[in-house]
Image (cartoon, grey):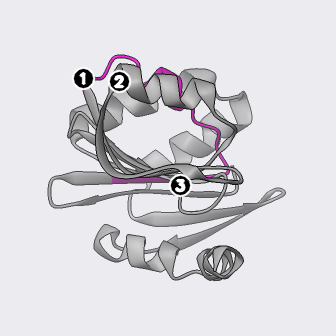
């Protein structure tokens, strides 16, 4: 992981990790439904899904049948909002219980180095961490402004131009 953030705004928690690989099949298999704001597969506009409500089974079927997923913005059981802002990063917005569960499950899958980074991030909420080799840069940022900060970054602008 090279970029990390954890913060709280009102009663919602934000977690941003870049890069990270999230298994959406695993994440959604116990859910009842998924609000699909956006689901885009690599090179296949015809299979994209937008503004739909899917059962867990139909989402899992869709994910298993199609090519690699490039874009997603999902709300799982109205508790966990997960989206990728850029190819291999993930932004999660959730209540406390769902966030703790997600972090617990994620931590078990990380190597020791990334577990330490996760622990550091959790110990300093409201801090954006950028990791370059052994150098860690810390930037204080409020959760309420973090989403616009990350979406306004050069990486996000480059992503938009690529698809225009």
Q: Residues within 10 Å of mark 1 (few under 14, many from 20)?
A: few
Q: Secondary structure at mark 2?
A: helix
Residue pointed to by mark 2: 56
- Which of the two labelled residues, at mark 1 and mark 3, occupies the earlier sequence position? 1
Alpha-carbon span between mark 2 and mark 1: 6 Å
Nearest to the observer: residue 28 or residue 141:
28
Residue pointed to by mark 1: 32
- Which of the two labelled residues, at mark 2 and mark 1, occupies the earlier sequence position? 1
Nearest to the observer: residue 140 or residue 27:
27
Q: Residue furthest right?
A: 133
- Asked if residue 61 lies left or right of residue 20, the reply is left
- Asked if residue 88 lies left or right of residue 81, the reply is right
Q: Position of residue 42 (x, y in %)?
A: 69, 50
Q: Position of residue 106 (x, y in %)?
A: 52, 29
Disc 2 + disc 1, Cβ < 8 Å: yes
How many numbered dots are placed on residues in this image?
Answer: 3
Q: Which mark is residue 84?
A: 3
């Amino acid at each position: 992981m090279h970029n990390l953030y954890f913060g709280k705004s009102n009663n919602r928690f934000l977690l941003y990790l870049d890069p990270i690989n999230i298994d959406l099949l695993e994440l959604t298999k116990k859910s009842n439904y998924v609000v699909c704001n956006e689901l885009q597969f690599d090179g296949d506009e015809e299979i994209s899904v937008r503004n739909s409500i899917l059962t867990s089974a139909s989402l899992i079927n869709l994910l298993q049948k199609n090519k690699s997923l490039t874009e997603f913005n999902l709300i799982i059981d109205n508790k966990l909002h997960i989206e990728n802002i850029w190819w291999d990063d993930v932004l999660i917005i959730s209540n406390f219980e769902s966030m703790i569960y997600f972090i617990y499950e994620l931590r078990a899958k990380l190597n020791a180095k990334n577990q330490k980074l996760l622990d550091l991030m959790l110990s300093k909420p409201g801090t954006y961490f950028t990791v370059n080799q052994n150098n860690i840069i810390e930037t204080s940022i409020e959760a309420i402004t973090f989403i616009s900060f990350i979406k306004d970054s050069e990486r996000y602008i480059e992503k938009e131009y690529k698809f225009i």
